[in-house]
Structures are given as structure tokens and as C-alpha cells.
């Protein structure tokens, strides 16, 4: 056991989901060690505590896992449960924390960000409930990073993590577990596996794009081995440290390989994809892409068809920029709908307090009270369970949904790598203009309301301010602006546009056309073209 002197490293402040930086930053002397020790200090030390450790397998996952294990041992942790080869999907890690009643876990991931020595790496701490560290704990971790003077590490050789076994690491119990089995068992308790097996037996065809990320082994085990889907169901199913040079973000842009299968000749019935660490999902039917906001609403409307939710939902929650489609389902069911800031950490208290069963974000995240993270494969399985019960195609299910609840046309436009000062000035100016926006007209739309979103947590009373600027227009359309908190280069401006349509003859339009006026108004309000020097977004989802 050694104590190493160190000095604070500037800027180790977590964003929307843990700390994400360039991989080479993490590999620099003391960077990872400082952040791990700061986390341990922030939670009152590791002595006698038990943790889960695992990551999405990206470049540096293996090396960082070894360092974290040695540091936990040196800080007196009594036990660590680690995924074989240091691998765990984020939802599986959340489940293991809960299943084993541990004190928390370290998840090595930069989620949907690319991986590689010149790409991104990340680390986040999840608490004993299995969910991401709250704002309060994240603030304490950051405070610790600013005064850190030393860290503890055991001087031991690397542990062989390739075999499921139990051993001892410098006095700490080390349990290497199969990353998939406990998670797969949990899924079996939630869904009607027989009904889904019957669906596949009837000739239902599916493609699951694991995008060379962590869900490959999970999807193969659950979809192919347990549910009997054909062996070519999972594509890109071998995890690679650089995700095959791809961008493991399940949306129509980055999952274009799947999209072309689903829109091509002889397309399968159902397509799905997941991200780097397995917490996101994309759902697509034959020629029918489902936006994440709509997916959340459809799942809320039909979740009772799956055994775990047969008793109904107690409530739902969505992040503020997510479309209000799910609110309409909640209203029809007479259950509460909560609106939280962006980031899964805000759902934790609501789930723990039993106020919500389902929650989701427009960024391809959906989940329930079964873990405290969003869960990509879970969403896919719930969709399969619903399709098995309703016997409808994805396109028909969507058409039925919109006919019942109306359609919240929705799109997110991302402007990436914007100079940080340009992005900050745009947001500051917009914030300053808020009091005068009401009543003004842009592209023919009149502003009804405009504010900077703050959230009062109904469970612990904490307040989070400046969580995105929302501008509502008369007639129900709205636009939201916020800056990404997960990027590692420049700033990413996110513009979220939405408009509700209830006219039965206007439910099947191209969202970009249906939203054209709102997009125009949003550009006018921010003077976007002049400030950014462009008006075409890098990514439209
Ligand atoms: C993005 C998403 C957000 C999600 C987060 C972590 O954060 O927008 O919904 O919770 O990734 O997966 P952002 O980059 O917008 O801060
Ligand atoms: Zn993710």
C-alpha cells in the first residue's frame, strides 16, 4: 500500500453524466487516480465498503479498471464485484449494485462518445441505489478534486480478470462475475419470455445493432440464446475498444447501417440499436423510425401488457427537453407526469420514492424502476413484449397511438464544436432577453411564455437552476435551447423543437416539414446564422 502525493488537476468537474475527457487526459499521470480518490473521499472513504466496478470496454477500460481496483483495496474496501474482463453495461452495473446491496459502483464509460486513444473516456460513480451520483455528491467530488493532496494505491501486479472467480487483492475480496447472467435473469422476471419466443417462432424478424459496443454479448444471450431469435439477429455484436471507429450513438445518423436495412427491400419487422455502454436505445419498425419521445409514450401506454407492469404505472417522468407525448398518456391514465432536468440522476429520487415507474429522455434513454439507469435492452424487450401481445406492426402501433393521443412532432438539432465563448454568449443573451420575449412574434409564431428552467426536487427539496431555456409559442409549439454537458470538445448547442398536431389528416408528415415554422422562429430568436456562421445542424435526430 502506498500513499502518493499529488496536486489538484483543474477542471475535474462532472457534466451531465460523470466526468468525460479525452482518453489521453485520463492516461496522463495522476488524472484518473485523482478523480477516483476524490470520489472515495467525497463519499466518506471506502473502508469496509463494497463496490461494483465495470465499464463499456472502450480503449483504456482494462488499464483503468486495474488502477481502480488497486485504489479501492488501498482505501480499505472490503469487497469489489467486477465484470469479467472489466466489462459491464451501465444498466447491468446498476443492477449488480442493487442486487448485492453494495455501497455503490464505478462505471467506466463515455457512453455514446467515440472510443480510442484519440477519442473519449469517462468515469462515473453510482450510489447505493444503483443510480448516478446526485448533484450534491457530484459537487462534493468536484470540491475534493480542488484540494486533493494524496491518493492511496496498492502496489500489486495486474489481476487476471478473464475468469469468473473469487480472489483476494491486497486484503480486499475480489469477485469476478459474468457480466450478462444476473442482468439476463432480471429481464426474465420482467417480461413474458414465452410470448416473445412465440413471436420469433412465428417468423417475426429483427435486427439488433450493438454498434460494436457493450450490448453485443447481452443481446446475443437474451435475444438469440434465450428468446430463440435467429443467429443473424445481432449485428456488430463483438465489442471493440474503438467501436469499429464508429460513433456508438443509436440514432438514424450513426446507426445508418441498421437504418438502411430497415428501409431497404425485405426489411425485418423490427430494428433496434444501443449505445457504447448499453443504456440507450433506438427503435425502428419496417420503414418506421420511432422517436425516443414517442417510444416513451408508447411504452407508457402499453407497459401493462408486460408482467412487471401489469398492475399499471404509478407515474411517469421525462426530462424537460423531451416531448410532452408521454404527458398525454399520463393524463389519459390519470397518473402524474414529472418534468426533470436533463440527465438520469434526476429520476433517481422519484424512482426511489415510488412516485414513477417509467421515465425517459429524448436522447434515446428509457427506463423503469427495475434499475436506476436508463436501459437499452430493457426498452427493446418491452417493445417486443408489446408487439407480441398487440400483434401490431410498429407502423400500425404508431398510427394508432397518434390517432388516440395526437402527435407531438419533435426534433433535436445539434450544432457541434461551437467555440465555447460563442455558445455562452448566445445563451447569456437569450437568458437576458427572456423577460421581453412574451408577446413578440417570430416567423409568424407568437411567444406565449419563456423561462430558464429550474427544478425543485419533490423528494429532497433540492433546487437545480439554469437547466435549459424554454420558449413556448401560442398554439402549443415550443423550442428549448441548452448546452451539452457531455461533450469533450468546444460546445454543443442543442435546439429541441416540438409542435402538437391533433388533426387526423396531418399525423403522417415529415417532422422537419411539420416543424419548419418553429425551426425558423428558433433561428430568428437566437440570430443563429449570424452567431454560428451556419444554420445547418451537424446532427438532426
Ligand atoms: C446527453 C443527453 C442527455 C443524457 C446524457 C447522458 O447529455 O442529452 O439526455 O442524459 O447525454 O447520456 P448532454 O450532452 O445533452 O448534456
Ligand atoms: Zn450511454
Image: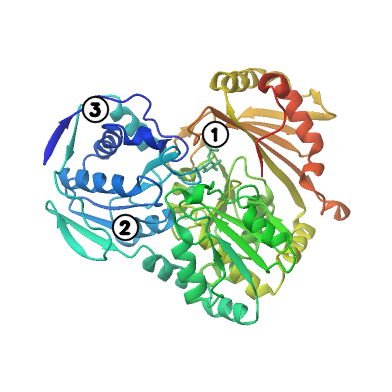
Q: Is mark 3 within 8 Å of ligand 1?
A: no
Circle 1 residue: 484
Indicate left or right for 501 with 308 as reference.
right
N-terminal label among 3 and 1? 3
Circle 2 residue: 85
Quadrant assignment, res 180: bottom left
Question: Callout 2: few (<14), some (14-19), or many (20+) C-alpha neighbours within 10 Å?
Answer: many
Q: Is mark 1 within 8 Å of ligand 1?
A: yes
Give SS at disc 3. Answer: loop
Mark closer to the observer (1, 2): 2
Indicate left or right for 235 with 38 as reference.
right
Q: Quadrant of the N terminus?
A: top left
For marks 3 and 1, give the CA distance: 28 Å
Mark 3 vs 2: CB contact within 8 A: no
Where residue 40 sits in the image (x, y, percent)?
25, 40
Quadrant assignment, res 143: top left
Q: Which residue is pictured at 12% across the width and 38% down the height? A: 2
Give SS at disc 1. Answer: loop
Amino acid at each position: 500500500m502506498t500513499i502518493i502525493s499529488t496536486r489538484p488537476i483543474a477542471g475535474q468537474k462532472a457534466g451531465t453524466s460523470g466526468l468525460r475527457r479525452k482518453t489521453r487526459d485520463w492516461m496522463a499521470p495522476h488524472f484518473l487516480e485523482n478523480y477516483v480518490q476524490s470520489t472515495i473521499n467525497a463519499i466518506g472513504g471506502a473502508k469496509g465498503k463494497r463496490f461494483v466496478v465495470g465499464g463499456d470496454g472502450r480503449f483504456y477500460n482494462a488499464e483503468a479498471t486495474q488502477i481502480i481496483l488497486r485504489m479501492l483495496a488501498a482505501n480499505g474496501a472490503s469487497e469489489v464485484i467486477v465484470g469479467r474482463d472489466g466489462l459491464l453495461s451501465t444498466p447491468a452495473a446498476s443492477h449488480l449494485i442493487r442486487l448485492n446491496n453494495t455501497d455503490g459502483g464505478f462505471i467506466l464509460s463515455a457512453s455514446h462518445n467515440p472510443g480510442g486513444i484519440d477519442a473519449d473516456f469517462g468515469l462515473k460513480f453510482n450510489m447505493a441505489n444503483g443510480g448516478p451520483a446526485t448533484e450534491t455528491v457530484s459537487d462534493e467530488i468536484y470540491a475534493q478534486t480542488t484540494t486533493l493532496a494524496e491518493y492511496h494505491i496498492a502496489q500489486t501486479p495486474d489481476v487476471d480478470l478473464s475468469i469468473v472467480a473469487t480472489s483476494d487483492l491486497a486484503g480486499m475480496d475480489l469477485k469476478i462475475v459474468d457480466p450478462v447472467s444476473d442482468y439476463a435473469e432480471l429481464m426474465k422476471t420482467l417480461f413474458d419470455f414465452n410470448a416473445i419466443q412465440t413471436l420469433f417462432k412465428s417468423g417475426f424478424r429483427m435486427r439488433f445493432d450493438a454498434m460494436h459496443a457493450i450490448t453485443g454479448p447481452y443481446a446475443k444471450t437474451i435475444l438469440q440464446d434465450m428468446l430463440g431469435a435467429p443467429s443473424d439477429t445481432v449485428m456488430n455484436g463483438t465489442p471493440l475498444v474503438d467501436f469499429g471507429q464508429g460513433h456508438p450513438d443509436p440514432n438514424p445518423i450513426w446507426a445508418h447501417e441498421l437504418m438502411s436495412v430497415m428501409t431497404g427491400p425485405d426489411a425485418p419487422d423490427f430494428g433496434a440499436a444501443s449505445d457504447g455502454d448499453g443504456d440507450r436505445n433506438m427503435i425502428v419498425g419496417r420503414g418506421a423510425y420511432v422517436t425516443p419521445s414517442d417510444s416513451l409514450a408508447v411504452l407508457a401506454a402499453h407497459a401493462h401488457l408486460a408482467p412487471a407492469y401489469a398492475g399499471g404505472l404509478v407515474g411517469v417522468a421525462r426530462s424537460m427537453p423531451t416531448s410532452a407525448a408521454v404527458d398525454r398518456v399520463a393524463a389519459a391514465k390519470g397518473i402524474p407526469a414529472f418534468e426533470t432536468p436533463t440527465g438520469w440522476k434526476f429520476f433517481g429520487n422519484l424512482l426511489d420514492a415510488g412516485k414513477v415507474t417509467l421515465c425517459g429522455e429524448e436522447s434515446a434513454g428509457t427506463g423503469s424502476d427495475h434499475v436506476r439507469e436508463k436501459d437499452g435492452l430493457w426498452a427493446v424487450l418491452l417493445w417486443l413484449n408489446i408487439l407480441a401481445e398487440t400483434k401490431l406492426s410498429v407502423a400500425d402501433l404508431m398510427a394508432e397511438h397518434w390517432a388516440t393521443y395526437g402527435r407531438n412532432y419533435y426534433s433535436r438539432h445539434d450544432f457541434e464544436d461551437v467555440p465555447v465563448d460563442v455558445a455562452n454568449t448566445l445563451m447569456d443573451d437569450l437568458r437576458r432577453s427572456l423577460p421581453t420575449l412574451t408577446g413578440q412574434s417570430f416567423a409568424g409564431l407568437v411567444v406565449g411564455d419563456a423561462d430558464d428552467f429550474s427544478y425543485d426536487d419533490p423528494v429532497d427539496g433540492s433546487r437545480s437552476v439554469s437547466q435549459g431555456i424554454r420558449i413556448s409559442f401560442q398554439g402549443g409549439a415550443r423550442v428549448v435551447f441548452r448546452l451539452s454537458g457531455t461533450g469533450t470538445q468546444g460546445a454543443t448547442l442543442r435546439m429541441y423543437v416540438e409542435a402538437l398536431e391533433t388533426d387526423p389528416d396531418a399525423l403522417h408528415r415529415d417532422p422537419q416539414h411539420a416543424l419548419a415554422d418553429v425551426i425558423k422562429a428558433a433561428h430568428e430568436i437566437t440570430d443563429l446564422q449570424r452567431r454560428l456562421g451556419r444554420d445547418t445542424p451537424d446532427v438532426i435526430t
